[in-house]
Image: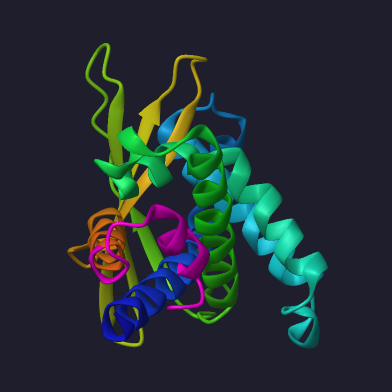
């Protein structure tokens, strides 16, 4: 399981860093736009960069730093939806308590990994591609191209329209790597390793990584 998680860690760190870089092309007009999927992604980059600037290099592993990152991500990421998708069939047999516990553990790991990567890239350029928004669509992708040190990274953020009318981030594809599918594969492997004992999988989710 180690190689898979290490790949996920690198991907999430790069994703966090590249998402923050989008601030470089955000204009005041974009900030005033309604909460469209693109505007949500762009606003999140501004909030994340503000957090990075608020905490100096030595302060980026403190509880205060992680708390600021968590507050920002909770506003745009549908953690319960993602956790349920990662558990797949196991979510149907899990108790409400187990679902709540796994969501908390999964969110904690995701936030800390993301937080460690957002300040790694300083000098890059980014292009947000036009978003196709058909009428009555409930899922949409916001795509970006990020150029850094001669390399071009492609990001695709999937957002879902909830029952409350708010768009929330539910998945990220980085350079062709689907993070949602990767986490699902990781959970499936953990279930096999722990004889389909959901409690053991939850308890060792972070430790096994």
- Front residue of 188/58: it is 188
- Residue 150 falls left or right of residue 54: left
Q: Where is residue 72 in the image (x, y as percent from the top left)?
A: 66, 49
- Quarter holding the N terminus is bottom left
On the question of residue 17 being in view, the answer is yes
Please say whether residue 207 is one of the residues in the magenta stretch. yes
Give residue 176's quadrant in the image. Answer: bottom left
Q: Where is residue 148 in the image (x, y as percent from the top left)?
A: 37, 80
- Front residue of 110/28: it is 110
Which residue is rendered at x = 52% and y = 15% of the image?
164
- Residue 66 falls left or right of residue 143: right
> Where 48 sits versus 42, above or below?
below
- Residue 109 falls left or right of residue 170: right
The range drawn in magenta is 192-209
Which residue is rendered at x = 42% and y = 46% of the image?
83
Which residue is rendered at x = 66% and y = 54% of the image?
70
- Front residue of 78/147: it is 78
């Amino acid at each position: 399981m180690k190689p898979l998680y290490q790949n996920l860690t690198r991907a999430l760190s790069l994703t966090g860093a590249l998402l923050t870089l989008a601030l470089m092309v955000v204009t005041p007009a974009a900030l005033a736009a309604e909460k469209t999927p693109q505007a949500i992604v762009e606003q999140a980059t501004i909030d994340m960069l503000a957090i990075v600037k608020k905490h100096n290099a030595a302060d980026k592993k403190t509880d205060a730093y992680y708390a600021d990152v968590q507050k920002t991500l909770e506003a745009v990421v549908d953690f319960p939806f993602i956790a349920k998708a990662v558990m797949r069939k196991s979510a149907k047999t899990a108790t409400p308590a187990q679902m709540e516990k796994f969501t908390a553990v999964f969110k904690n790991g995701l936030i800390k990994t993301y937080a460690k990567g957002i300040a790694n890239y300083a000098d890059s350029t980014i292009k947000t591609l036009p978003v196709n928004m058909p009428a009555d669509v409930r899922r949409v992708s916001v795509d970006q191209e990020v150029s850094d040190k001669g390399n071009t990274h492609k990001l695709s953020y999937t957002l879902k329209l909830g029952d409350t009318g708010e768009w929330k981030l539910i998945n990220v594809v980085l350079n062709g790597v689907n993070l949602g599918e990767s986490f699902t594969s990781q959970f499936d492997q953990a279930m096999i390793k722990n004889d389909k004992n959901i409690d053991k999988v939850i308890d060792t989710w972070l430790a096994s990584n």
